[in-house]
Amino acid sequence: MQWESWSAFWQMGGAAPFVWGSYGLTVFLVVVELIMVARRRRETVRRLLRLRRANANGRGGRKVFEEIVE
């Protein structure tokens, strides 16, 4: 498509709220998903490190694992 001017491009032939709103919502949701994945990864790494330390200290690994999972 060719636009007559930048303002015509930004207005998208009257559909700008739908087009730019869709882009904005998509970017927002992708950022939220990335934040959630990073948090889940960090928590999983913490749990695994606690389990490793418990096993190295001779504590019951299964019991510690059940505590961590809960």
Image (cartoon, helix red, strand yellow):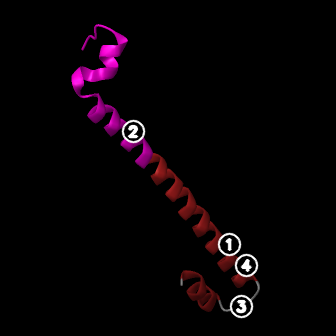
- Find the distance from the CA under tag 4 to the CA under tag 1: 6 Å
Vertical placement of residue 33 versus 11, above or below: below
- Find the distance from the CA under tag 2 to the CA under tag 4: 44 Å
Residue contact between numbered discs 4 and 1, judged by CB atoms under 8 Å: yes
Q: Residues within 10 Å of mark 2 (few under 14, many from 20)?
A: few
Residue 4: x, y in percent?
Answer: 28, 7
Nearer to us: label 1 or label 2 = 2
Question: Which residues fall within the magenta stretch?
Answer: 1-29
Residue contact between numbered discs 4 and 3, judged by CB atoms under 8 Å: no
Mark 1 = which residue?
Answer: 49
Residue contact between numbered discs 1 and 3, judged by CB atoms under 8 Å: no
Q: Earlier in the sequence, mark 2 or mark 3?
A: 2
Identify the amino acid type marked 4.
Arg
Mark 3 = which residue?
Answer: 59
Q: Residue at x 34, y 21 (%)?
A: 10
Q: Residue at x 22, y 21 (%)?
A: 13
Circle 2 SS class: helix
Nearer to us: label 2 or label 3 = 2
**Rendered image quadrant of residue 53:** bottom right
Circle 1 SS class: helix
Mark 4 = which residue?
Answer: 53
Residue 26: x, y in percent?
Answer: 37, 43
Identify the amino acid type marked 1.
Leu
- Find the distance from the CA under tag 1 to the CA under tag 3: 14 Å
Mark 2 = which residue?
Answer: 24
Q: Is residue 5 left or right of residue 1?
A: right
- Find the distance from the CA under tag 1 to the CA under tag 2: 38 Å
